[in-house]
């Protein structure tokens, strides 16, 4: 135990003194997680809503794809993104391989299946009478979508929590697409990996790990509290 | 497109001709997934049952903890295990660092929350009358547990699928604990990371394709098993 205690005693001051390297990595991590989740919500909510409500051809295939996307190893997603971004490749002219922009792209793609699959599942879990009634009362598609999202908000928030959690803790894609470049496009999770495997710098690894743990706990707790608060069923009908 | 095509042209023969390195990595991946999931079930299922069926103090807190542990970044689990297993650490004398046993242990610990949290949720989702009735009819604890697992088998299978999925696609923890040693304690996922980092894209893609195929086969197989056993089949046996 003496060893662990020693490492901890060296790690704590790094956090409390606001070590500039650790703070900058934490800031990059927050930006990546929030931005990737936000873009995934913007892109994924309409798709998830359409999947949850829709009665169109190819719906099952799309839903199966979204579910399969959840099981896809991040490292494979990262590899595919990198191959598309390499200079001689399809999107090579963008020049975003081994950049922070590339990391944003990879994390957004990883967050997307969570938003789509979990939103669709949440909407499908609504009492079927609700949507039928709204349709019968002449709700437009937009109104129907809005109603479904509002009623399925607990599930939508769960999707947001899952997406955020994934982008905070994921390493495979970040390392492959971004190259895990110190002080530039590292997240806290990939920085831990580098401190241990690359530099064998345990106090730093532990300090970064503790910051990551705190960040995960705070973000997830805040979202969970919001989720539970919004839990009560509140039907509101508005005049069209 | 040129690059993608080239990579694919070199990757496919590696799979088709049964590259010995690739083969050994596949074998180890299967071993790790099977062993870790089995141990996680062995340890986790009794805990899940106690949480799902039990009526003891602190049960809510424990369920909350189990759910929260699902959001724990694997890198942090790896970091903690690493610091415990370092020669000077508390379990340093076991020499688990950079070994296959260490990888087994890390993956088991990562799979455990899925079994506990999803297993408990599945048991809790049973119609409340069912365990109550079994209790009234004088079922022993063991009989109650067996009944609950049998009735909640779809949820339990979902937990197995999730556990299997993490062990197949996770890289953060095993790279830290196992060191990603070439051809020794690499899984397909960590081998893909290794090859992508080394810019061996043909090898990385070959590994990626095999990994996706493996996930499809294993997940598909387990899912089919679940659907076949899907119908509610209440069977009561005399408590002889």
Image: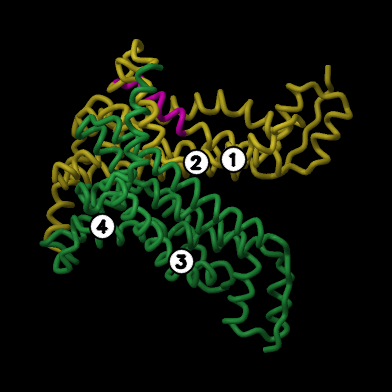
Q: Residue at x 71, y 37 (%)?
A: B151
Q: Which residues are magenta?
A: B99-110
Q: Nearer the viewer, residue B191 or B233?
A: B191
Q: Chain of mark 3?
A: A
In the rendered image, the residue lying farthest to the right is B136
Q: Chain of mark 1?
A: B
Q: Alpha-carbon distance for marks 4 and 3?
A: 20 Å
The answer to whether the residues at label 2 and label 1 have Cβ atoms under 8 Å apart is yes
Q: Position of residue A63 (x, y in %)?
A: 49, 61
Say which residue label 3 marks. Answer: A41
Q: Residue at x 12, y 61 (%)?
A: A87
Q: Alpha-carbon distance for marks 2 and 4?
A: 24 Å
* Mark 4 or 3, closer to the camera: 3
- How packed mark 3 is, by other alpha carbons closer than 10 Å (few <14, some 14-19, many 20 or more), is many
Q: Residue at x 15, y 62 (%)?
A: A89
Q: Chain of mark 4?
A: A
The answer to whether the residues at label 3 and label 1 have Cβ atoms under 8 Å apart is no
| Label of residue B118 in the image | 1
Q: Quadrant of residue A141?
A: bottom right
Q: Alpha-carbon distance for marks 1 and 4?
A: 31 Å
Q: Position of residue A38 (x, y in %)?
A: 42, 65
Q: Quadrant of residue B132?
A: top right
Indicate left or right for A240 with B33 as reference: right
Is disc 4 in the same subunit as disc 3?
Answer: yes
| Label of residue A81 in the image | 4
In the rendered image, the residue lying farthest to the top is B93
Say which residue label 2 marks. Answer: B162
Q: Alpha-carbon distance for marks 3 and 1?
A: 25 Å
Q: Identify whether B145 is placed above or below A70.
A: above
The answer to whether the residues at label 4 and label 3 have Cβ atoms under 8 Å apart is no
């Amino acid at each position: 135990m003496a060893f662990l205690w020693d490492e901890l005693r060296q790690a704590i001051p790094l956090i409390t003194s606001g070590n500039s390297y650790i703070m900058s990595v934490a800031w990059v991590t927050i930006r990546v997680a929030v931005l990737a989740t936000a873009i995934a919500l913007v892109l994924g909510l309409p798709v998830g809503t359409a999947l949850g409500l829709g009665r169109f051809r190819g719906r099952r295939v799309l839903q199966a794809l979204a579910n399969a996307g959840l099981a896809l190893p991040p490292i494979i997603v990262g590899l595919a993104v990198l191959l598309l971004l390499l200079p001689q490749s399809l999107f090579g002219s963008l020049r975003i391989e081994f950049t922070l922009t590339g990391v944003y792209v990879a994390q957004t793609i990883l967050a997307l299946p969570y938003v789509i699959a979990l939103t669709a599942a949440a909407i499908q879990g609504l009492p079927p009478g609700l949507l039928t009634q709204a349709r019968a009362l002449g709700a437009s598609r937009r109104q129907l979508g809005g109603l479904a999202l509002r009623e399925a908000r607990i599930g939508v928030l769960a999707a947001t929590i899952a997406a955020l959690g994934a982008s905070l803790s994921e390493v495979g894609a970040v390392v492959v697409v971004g190259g895990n470049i110190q002080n530039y496009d590292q997240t806290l999770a990939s920085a831990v990996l580098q401190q241990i495997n690359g530099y064998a710098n345990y106090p730093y690894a532990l300090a970064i790990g503790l910051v990551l743990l705190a960040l995960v706990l705070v973000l997830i707790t805040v979202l969970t509290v919001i989720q539970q608060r919004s839990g009560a069923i509140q039907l509101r009908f508005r005049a069209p | 497109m040129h690059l993608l095509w080239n990579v694919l042209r070199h990757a496919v023969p590696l799979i088709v001709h049964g590259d010995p390195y690739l083969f050994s990595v596949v074998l180890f991946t299967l071993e790790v997934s099977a062993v870790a999931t089995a141990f996680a079930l062995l340890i986790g299922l009794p805990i899940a049952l106690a949480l799902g069926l039990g009526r003891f103090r602190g049960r809510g807190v424990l369920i909350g903890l189990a759910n929260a542990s699902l959001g724990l970044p694997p890198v942090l689990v790896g970091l903690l295990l690493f610091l415990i297993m370092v020669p000077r650490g508390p379990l340093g004398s076991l020499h688990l660092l950079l070994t296959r046993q260490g990888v087994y242990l890390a993956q088991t610990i990562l799979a455990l929350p899925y079994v506990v949290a999803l297993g408990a949720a599945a048991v809790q989702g049973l119609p409340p009358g069912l365990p109550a009735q079994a209790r009234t009819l004088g079922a022993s604890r063991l009989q109650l547990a067996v009944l609950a697992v049998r009735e909640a088998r779809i949820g339990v299978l979902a937990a197995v699928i999730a556990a299997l999925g993490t062990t197949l696609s996770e890289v953060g923890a095993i790279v830290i604990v196992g060191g990603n040693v070439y051809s020794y304690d690499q899984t397909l996922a960590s081998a893909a990371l290794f090859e992508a980092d080394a810019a061996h894209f043909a090898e990385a893609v070959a590994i990626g394709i095999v990994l996706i195929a493996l996930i499809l086969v294993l997940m598909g197989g387990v899912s089919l098993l679940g659907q076949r056993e899907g119908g509610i089949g209440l069977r009561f046996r005399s408590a002889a």
